[in-house]
Image (cartoon, helix red, strand yellow):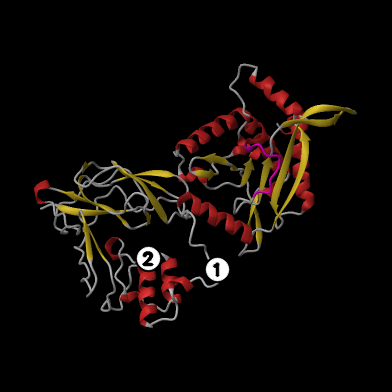
């Protein structure tokens, strides 16, 4: 007899708790092999192809494209064993059935060992007045169930629990419409509306966030989820927790541009302007290490970090991402240029790994590519500072006592005022400006 195994959304690492289904790569009825990619998902950090650890026939898929699933929610079920005895009702097969071949593609929560035997799931009864929707091998139950009991409730989202608590709703009375009866936000909001009509609660869904400003009923709504939602959460946290300040200075970048032209005319691999600025950055951080740090708020300590993992802002079709160049302090201009090119291409194609988007200690933000001179960016939490670089354009400048047209750039430093005072920040920024104006200054630290 065939065994139907359930493959759940694995922990993709880096503290990620959910993922958005972008593209299904298999259909119900398709034959899959061990480690075959079955779905492409978008996490808060990158696009990831998720491989299936089982070989067999796909009997169900959970979630349409565009649906966000929490880690641990079912992705699909796979029937392994004799194809003629596949049970396609969506329940997990008997523990006595043959075990599937182990996966060699290790994901968090999925190893290379044989999959454990599983018990057959018993679905809750359909309450009076509720409906059970069936699509393929997946079955969902909607409605209220007054006989749910006092056991654990299938809720993953803290937001769903908070909505129920604020509305005085007992989650045991709900049967969720999500995979395997998972209670979703929509289930709680529907139940609150019914309870409000019946007079069983004074909190209606519209009043759940009483402290929020009313939202206009017309207009286009853009969900804050996936990458967009993560960026929003991180920027909000940065503004809430970091007392930031910004200082800036104009610098004559004419000599830096000439130096780059000379480097690239020598026949060696091309060096990007961003790489030269990054090399200046790492030299400045060696002189002012307080800015390569983070604050441990609980311990009330500033942790000065040994290595410089340099993040840089990159605009992609998916939105703003910040890839990280590991050990930037140990790379020369050519090495930095090559790594920037590799990470930028990966960002453009959506091929960045989650680890390449985390762990930064300082960020370099070249907003000059957008044609602007200055900015006061929000620090990339939990880092302590960010160097901003505006566009380099010809401007009137007093050079060697005479007015001349020079290539001028505005440099800005946004920093966490808890890690240093204005003297340190100003010293860092002045050193960066000196290196931009006189690249030979860097020779002292090479």
- The residue at the point 32 percent across, 64 percent down is 182
Q: Earlier in the sequence, mark 2 or mark 1?
A: 2
Q: Position of residue 359 (x, y in %)?
A: 54, 48
- Judged left or right of residue 445, residue 16 is left
Residue span colored magenta:
370-377
Q: Residue furthest bottom?
A: 199
Q: Position of residue 413 (x, y in %)?
A: 71, 46
Could you tell me which quadrant the C terminus lies in? top right
**Residue 371 located within the stretch drawn in magenta:** yes
**Residue 251 located within the stretch drawn in magenta:** no
Q: Position of residue 368 (x, y in %)?
A: 66, 37
Q: Residue furthest right?
A: 401
- The residue at the point 38 percent across, 53 percent down is 11
What residue is pinned by disc 2? 186
Mark number, residue 129: none
Give the distance between the C-alpha atoms of the residues marked 2 and 1, in whole angstroms.
Answer: 19 Å
What residue is pinned by disc 1? 212
In terms of secondary structure, what is the magenta stretch mainly?
Answer: loop
Q: Nearer the viewer, residue 443 or 42?
A: 42
């Amino acid at each position: 007899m065939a065994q139907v195994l359930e493959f759940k959304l694995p922990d993709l690492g880096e503290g990620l708790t959910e993922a958005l289904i972008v593209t299904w790569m298999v259909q119900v009825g398709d034959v899959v092999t061990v480690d075959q990619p079955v779905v492409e998902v978008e996490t808060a950090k990158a696009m990831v192809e998720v491989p299936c650890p089982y070989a067999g026939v796909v009997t169900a898929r959970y979630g349409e494209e565009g649906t966000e699933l929490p880690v641990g929610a079912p992705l699909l079920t796979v029937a392994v064993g004799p194809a003629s005895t596949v049970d396609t009702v969506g329940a997990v097969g008997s523990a006595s059935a043959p075990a599937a071949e182990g996966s060699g593609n290790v994901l968090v929560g999925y190893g290379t060992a044989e999959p454990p035997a599983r018990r057959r799931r018993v679905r809750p009864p359909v309450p009076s007045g509720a409906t059970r929707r069936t699509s393929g091998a997946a079955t969902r139950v909607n409605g209220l169930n007054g006989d749910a009991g006092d056991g654990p409730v299938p809720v993953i989202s803290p937001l769903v629990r908070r909505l129920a608590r604020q509305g005085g709703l007992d989650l045991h009375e709900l049967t969720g419409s999500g995979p395997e009866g998972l209670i979703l936000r929509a289930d709680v909001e529907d139940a609150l509306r019914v309870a409000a009509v019946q007079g069983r609660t004074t909190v209606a869904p519209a009043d759940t966030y009483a402290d929020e400003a009313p939202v206009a009923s017309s207009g286009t709504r853009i969900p804050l989820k996936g990458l967009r939602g993560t960026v929003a959460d991180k920027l909000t946290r940065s503004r809430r927790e970091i007392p930031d300040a910004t200082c800036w200075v104009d610098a004559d970048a004419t000599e830096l541009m000439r130096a780059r032209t000379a480097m690239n005319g020598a026949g060696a691999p091309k060096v990007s302007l961003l790489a030269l600025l990054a090399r200046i950055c790492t030299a400045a951080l060696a002189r002012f290490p307080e800015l390569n740090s983070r604050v441990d708020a609980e311990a009330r300590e500033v942790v000065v970090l040994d290595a410089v993992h340099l993040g840089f802002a990159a605009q992609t079709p998916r939105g703003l991402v910040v890839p990280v160049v590991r050990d930037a302090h140990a790379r020369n201009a050519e090495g930095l240029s090559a790594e920037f090119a590799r990470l930028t291409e990966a960002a453009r194609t959506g091929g960045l790994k989650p680890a390449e988007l985390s762990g930064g200690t300082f960020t370099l933000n070249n907003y000059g590519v957008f044609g602007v001179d200055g900015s006061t960016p929000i620090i990339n939490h939990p880092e302590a500072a960010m160097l901003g670089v505006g566009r380099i354009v010809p401007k009137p400048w007093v050079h060697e006592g005479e007015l001349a047209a020079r290539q001028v750039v505005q440099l800005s430093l946004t920093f966490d005022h808890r890690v240093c005072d204005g003297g340190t920040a100003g010293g860092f920024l002045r050193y960066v400006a000196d290196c931009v104006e006189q690249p030979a200054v860097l020779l002292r630290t090479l």
